Image: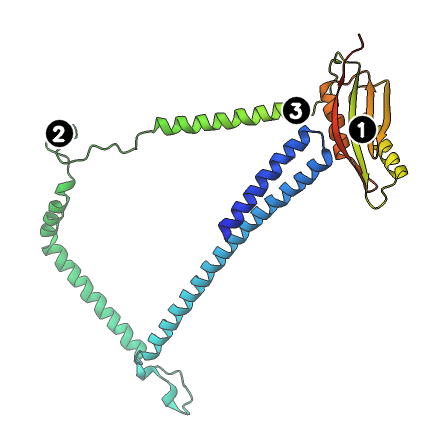
Amino acid sequence: MKYVSYLLGGAAAVGAGAYLFVYLYRWEWQRAVVCGLLLLIVEIFLVTTVLLSRLSRLERRLDETEKRAEEVQRRLEQAREGAPERFRWLDTRHLGDRSNANDTFVFVPVLMATGVALSAAALLIQKIAGATGRAGAERRLAGRLARLAAPPGGVQADIRGIDERPAVPPSRPVRTLMRTALALAVAVMVTLLTFVLADAVQTRRAPLPDSAASMVVFRVEVRSADTGVARDLAARDFWETCRRSTAAEPEHAQLTKLEHGVYAGVVRPALPDHDLLRLRGCLMDASANRAQAEVLGEGQAPPVP
């Protein structure tokens, strides 16, 4: 289930990102904003899924650790319960009503005397072992360390049976070259996409085409109030808003009603191709007072001979 969610989220993110660039290229800003929000939501979903997966994994590990600790504690308690009581003569529960219940009788003096006696015996054994076993111990130690000594001919002599593999593994130029090529390809693609998108949304003035005028034909639909007056008002609003969104300054921008809900806008002088694309995108993206426009076609009128 986790991998399915990753797959669906990744596909949704790729689709939202692709349409984001498409709508930016078409100058359809509202749709681009919607795709951007969708992309952000999908990214948050993926990050949240990864975090929840990591947290659940940590929670399972903590539960397993707690279970192991409880099992160890239970085994220690069982072992403690089954162990015999040692030093029963120190137990004060059988003293009854004695005034000094913590009386340890002769334990401390006996313990001190035993410690002194054991220390003296250990010192005596150490002296005897050091005087009698030093030579043999050194010989045995020298025999064990003989295999670590340098060869007879020194460190430069030929030694058989030693693997001549280098301590550091050799570099892999093919893998390094592939990673470098992949990184360069990704950088070039990102750079080209950035320049293409920047050129598509540029607002600088472009040379005027050799045409008499630019024409756009679009249809207007008004939901729940599809009357002629409402369509005319919406078409006029869309046209006046979108023709001012271009970088060019048309001297004449006339809107003509052709038939039921279909209008034709004519701009003189002719708009450059980029401004015509911006005008089309603005009309396709326009939405006001339950009205929506659909561009049926656009083009350049040939110059008058």
Pick the front one: 293 or 191 = 293
**Residue highlighted by disc 1:** 242
- Asked where in the image residue 166 lies, by quadrant, the reply is top left
Q: Determine whether label 3 and label 1 are within 8 Å by CB.
A: no
**Residue type at numbered disc 1:** Cys
Disc 3, SS = helix
For marks 3 and 1, give the CA distance. Answer: 21 Å
Give yes or no for contact between labels 3 and 2 (Cβ–Cβ under 8 Å).
no
Foreground pick, 107 / 81: 81
Identify the coloring: rainbow
Q: Which residue is drawn at 67% across and 24% down?
A: 200
Q: Distance between the residues labelled 3 and 2?
A: 68 Å
Local SS, label 1 = helix
Task: Provide residue 292's location: percent of width, then percent of height.
Answer: 79, 38
Q: Is residue 283 left or right of residue 151?
A: right
Report x, y in % for residue 71.
39, 69
The numbered mark, 3 or 1, whose residue comes first in the sequence reads: 3
Three-letter code, disc 3:
Ala
> Residue 231: image x %, image y %?
86, 37
On residue 158, the disc is 2
Q: Is mark 2 on a helix, strand or loop?
A: loop
Q: Name the residue under label 3.
A: 198
Of tags 3 and 2, the one toward the viewer is 3
